[in-house]
Image (cartoon, helix red, strand yellow):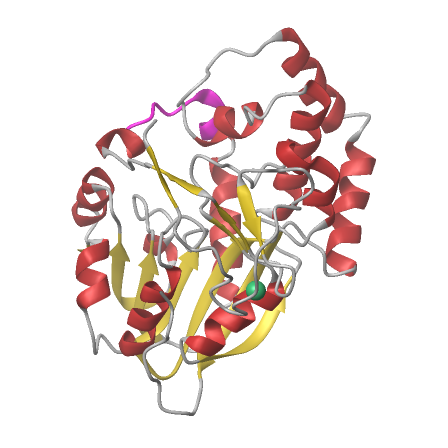
Amino acid sequence: MSKKEFIRTLCIFCKSKPTLSLLGLTDYWHCPDCGIAWVKKIPKVEYGDMYYKGKSTLASRVFAPIGKTFYSLRSTYAGNGGKKVWIDVGAGDGGFLSTVAAKKKIGVEVSSSGRKIMQQNGLDTLTDRQFLKSKGLNADIISFWHVLEHVEKPWEYLESAKRNLKKNGKIIIGIPNIDSFEFKYAKKYWFHLQPQFHLWHFTPKSVKKLLDITGFTVNKIDHWSIEHHPTGVLQSFINKSSGSSENVLHKLIKRGTGKSHLAPKDIFWVGFWTSIGSPIIFSFWLGGSIFRKAGTIVVVASKSAYKFSSPKIK
Ligand SMILES: [Zn+2]
């Protein structure tokens, strides 16, 4: 895998000198002030056309109804009332976007196979590049479900969101939170670390700073994400117990990609943590949410009143 080195050696928000003290993970810079972490070397990630062509496994079909429930939970962050325009950034194949209550639905997606599926289902699409150049789409809601940690310049996406959001519109951001019990427990085995995909690891403090710089005001930071948080805890426990960062359970359920066979120890730990060990998983999830140290958070923000000027991020 070819990699290029991140040239950012100061925190983009605090301008603090980062440390390498991210619980022993030496591949990351870590800001001692806002807590944000970023990879030292950017992995070259291809969200190629095969990304959405993974075979539908039995497990993923079994879990499909749960997925539908999660999608309706995502929609609750948008609040009541009819929506005219909803933009989902990193829309994938449009599975979530097609369920939202809005007249016009626009899916922003880097993968052409993902866009093709959306178009076949009657959704409008934009490439990432088109979205970053767009303005005045007048959206009620712009959602980012586990997207900002993947992109090299997350602020560009928020600047574009600001240009395309109507006056009282809202943005909804789901992201992993490295300031979490889960990361402190699992460290390199943390499910959401995913060094091959995740370039940034936000904390509530740093995401507030990012939104502030790009002209948004945070309305709410939710630590009770049922969709991503408990599953992240479960997978992190399985990873740590089996000494593998393969995220076997996640791969099995999500898509038929990657490692398709399970080693006996993986089967054992999946079995253990989904049965006898499940009260521990449940307590960990509950504790993370109650103490606001959840492994994933959902942030809802609206445009701030002051006139936006381009952020001074390099
Ligand atoms: Zn910082």
Residue at 29% from the left image edge and 43% from the top image edge: 93
Q: Position of residue 138 (x, y in %)?
A: 26, 78
Q: Residue furthest bottom?
A: 306
Q: Quadrant of residue 126?
A: bottom left
Q: Nearer the viewer, residue 166 or 99?
A: 166
Q: Quick check: 267 left or right of 261?
A: right
| Image height of 201 relative to 167, above or below | above
Q: Nearer the viewer, residue 25 or 144?
A: 25
Residue 79 visible? The answer is: no
Q: Nearer the viewer, residue 102 or 282?
A: 282
Residue 287 visible? The answer is: yes
Q: Position of residue 177 (x, y in %)?
A: 60, 53
Residue 190: in magenta span: no
Q: Quadrant of residue 46?
A: top left
Q: Quadrant of the C terminus?
A: bottom left
Q: Quick check: 237 left or right of 19?
A: right
Residue 57: in magenta span: yes
| Image height of 167 relative to 103, above or below | below
Q: Residue furthest top?
A: 264
Q: Quick check: 88 left or right of 263?
A: left
Q: Nearer the viewer, residue 57 or 205?
A: 205
Residue at 48% from the left image edge and 44% from the top image edge: 39
Q: Position of residue 137 (x, y in %)?
A: 22, 74
| Image height of 294 relative to 85, above or below | above
| Image height of 252 relative to 30, above or below | above
Residue at 78% from the left image edge and 60% from the top image edge: 291
Q: Position of residue 165 (x, y in %)?
A: 32, 77
Quarter of the displayed picture in which ligand 1 can be seen: bottom right
The magenta segment is 53-61
Q: Quadrant of the N terminus?
A: top left
Residue at 53% from the left image edge and 72% from the top image edge: 209
